[in-house]
Amino acid sequence: PIRKLKPAIKGTNQKQLLIDGPFKPDSAYRLIVDSGGITDLYCNSNDSVSRSVKVSSPEELGLAVINVEVPPLDRGQVILNLLDKDGNVLREDFLNTADSTVTYKQLKPGKYRIKAIVDRNGNGFWDEGEFFDGLRPEPVLFYPQVLDVKANWEMRDLTFDVEEMMKATGQ
């Protein structure tokens, strides 16, 4: 049994637990969490849980590397979301330098989208704007192509020019 695991909360919804450990590729494991092993902010705890988990081999996974050209923002940032085919956020990155390279490793084969939120005020989430105050919503942009990730493939030389897309869409 592996006992030295490093659990961490994953994502902005804080409902996923990422467990990092010395897992071997192409191996199966059983995750057992005893009753009361996880407690939330409101002191609610879990029932006992037992799940089988398979660790994929590197040959079963893909990789995507995307260069993101970030517009100059006084105090803001660009929030980059990797979305699955159903629109669920799988990963969130906060970019505040002019050009950033984001690498998505160990992706299961499938279709993915990339969403960019231009977080002009730097508060870490999308603001809807205020009609009566004349404040427009923060821009939300999508990388124009769907990423079709295949097993044992690398997608490189992808560029998401956020500033150019903002100009093209009048944002």
Image: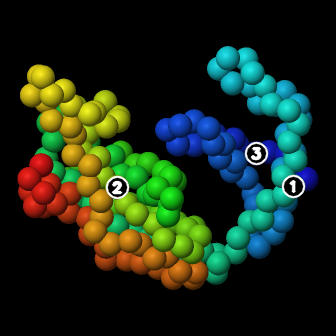
In terms of secondary structure, where does tag 1 sit?
strand
Three-letter code for the amino acid on which mark 1 is drawn: Arg
**Mark before the other along the chain sequence, 1 or 2:** 1
The residue tagged with tag 2: helix, strand or loop?
A: strand
The reply, left or right, for residue 115 in relation to residue 96 is right
**Circle 3 crowding by C-alpha within 10 Å: few under 14, some 14–19, many from 20:** few
Alpha-carbon span between mark 3 and mark 2: 32 Å
Residue drawn at (74%, 25%), measured in percent from left and top?
39
Check residue 30 in the rendering and tell me which mark sits there, or answer none.
1
The CA distance from mark 3 to mark 1 is 13 Å
Colour pattern of the rendering? rainbow
Label 3 vs 1, first from the N-terminus: 3
Reading the image, the residue beneath label 2 is: 115
Is residue 85 at least partly visible in the picture?
yes
- Label 2 amino acid? Lys
Q: Residue at x 28, y 33 (%)?
A: 127
Task: State the CA–CA distance, disc 1 to disc 2.
Answer: 34 Å
Dot placed on the residue nearer the N-terminal end, 3 or 2: 3
Numbered circle sitting on residue 5: 3
Residue 141 position within the rendered picture, expressed as x and y whole percent measured from the top left: 26, 55
Work out whether residue 48 or residue 23 is closer to the camera in this orientation and state it: 48
